[in-house]
Image (spheres, rainbow, N blue to C red):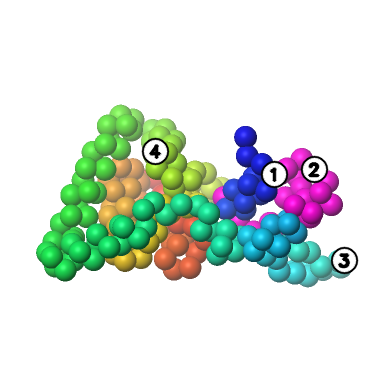
């Protein structure tokens, strides 16, 4: 079971910036108790707040994670991975690196395809895909929007350093989702490498 501070960090990571009252509601504690926890985290440099004014009444504080807190969510073997990418690029060139990424994509897609089991139901496939991605550290989830489309969300990227060093990983990810969720149409709507707090994909059923 996570401690209250860890629970706050995890929740802000997945839910995004939130007001003190929302944090209190999530924890099941009073606003004052939540504020105390948030102020302790702020003193450690893990959260920060901005003040929002919304109509009449007192300004509201909205809390979010700092870069220091983001670093507590692991980027798996980041330095070693980046060094390996650069070594492959120097040894085999950009085309060789692209072939390596393509081979990884194919192997991952095959494993995912077996796990999804060819289920024709889009929501069932999204359930299994999100579970697979979460097991790999992506903190994935999905939801259905009012217009009938779906949103696949990855709240964390455990290979962010590798993706920053070679965006072929991101292209391969999008391509793999398109294959696994076909004939649905997939588009990336949020991207960590574009300074978003998460990656998100809109899925329009065919």
Which one is closest to the eye, mark 4 or mark 2?
A: 2
User: Marks 1 and 3, Cα distance to the nearest angstrom?
Assistant: 29 Å
The picture places residue 192, in percent across and down from the top left corner, at: 45, 62
Front-most of residues 74 and 121: 74
Q: Quadrant of residue 80?
A: bottom left
Residue 200, compared with residue 166, is above or below; it is above
**Which structural element holds mark 4?**
helix
Q: Can you say which quadrant of the picture contains the N terminus?
A: top right
User: Marks 4 and 2, Cα distance to the nearest angstrom?
Assistant: 33 Å
Around disc 4, counting alpha carbons within 10 Å, would you say few (fewer than 14), some (14 to 19), or many (20 or more)? some
Q: Which mark is residue 29?
A: 2
* Mark before the other along the chain sequence, 4 or 2: 2
Q: Is residue 45 left or right of residue 157?
A: right
**Which structural element holds mark 1?**
helix
Q: Does the magenta-highlighted stretch encompass residue 22?
A: yes
Q: Does the magenta-highlighted stretch encompass residue 38?
A: no
Callout 1–callout 2 Cβ contact below 8 Å: yes
* Mark before the other along the chain sequence, 2 or 3: 2
Residue 11, compared with residue 189, is above or below; it is above
Which residue has dot 3 on it?
57
* Mark before the other along the chain sequence, 1 or 2: 1
Which residue has dot 4 on it?
132
Which residue has dot 1 on it?
4
Q: Label the magenta part by its dominant secondary structure.
A: helix
The picture places residue 13, in percent across and down from the top left corner, at: 57, 53
């Amino acid at each position: 079971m996570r401690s209250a501070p860890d629970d706050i960090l995890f929740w802000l990571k997945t839910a995004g910036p939130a007001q003190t009252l929302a944090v209190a509601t999530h924890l099941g504690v009073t606003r004052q108790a939540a504020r105390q926890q948030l102020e302790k985290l702020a003193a450690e440099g893990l959260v920060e707040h901005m003040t929002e004014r919304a109509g009449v009444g007192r300004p509201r504080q909205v809390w979010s994670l700092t870069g220091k807190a983001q670093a507590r969510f692991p980027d798996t073997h980041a330095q070693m991975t980046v060094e390996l990418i650069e070594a492959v690029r120097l040894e085999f060139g950009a085309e060789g690196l692209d072939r390596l990424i393509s081979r990884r994509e194919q192997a991952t897609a095959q494993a995912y395809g077996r796990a999804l089991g060819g289920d024709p139901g889009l929501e069932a496939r999204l359930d299994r895909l999100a579970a697979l991605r979460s097991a790999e550290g992506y903190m994935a989830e999905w939801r259905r929007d009012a217009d009938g489309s779906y949103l696949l969300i990855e709240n964390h990227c455990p290979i962010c350093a590798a993706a920053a060093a070679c965006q072929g990983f991101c292209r391969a990810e999008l391509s793999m989702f398109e294959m696994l969720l076909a004939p649905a149409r997939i588009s990336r709507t949020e991207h960590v490498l574009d300074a978003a707090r998460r990656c998100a994909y809109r899925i329009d059923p065919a």
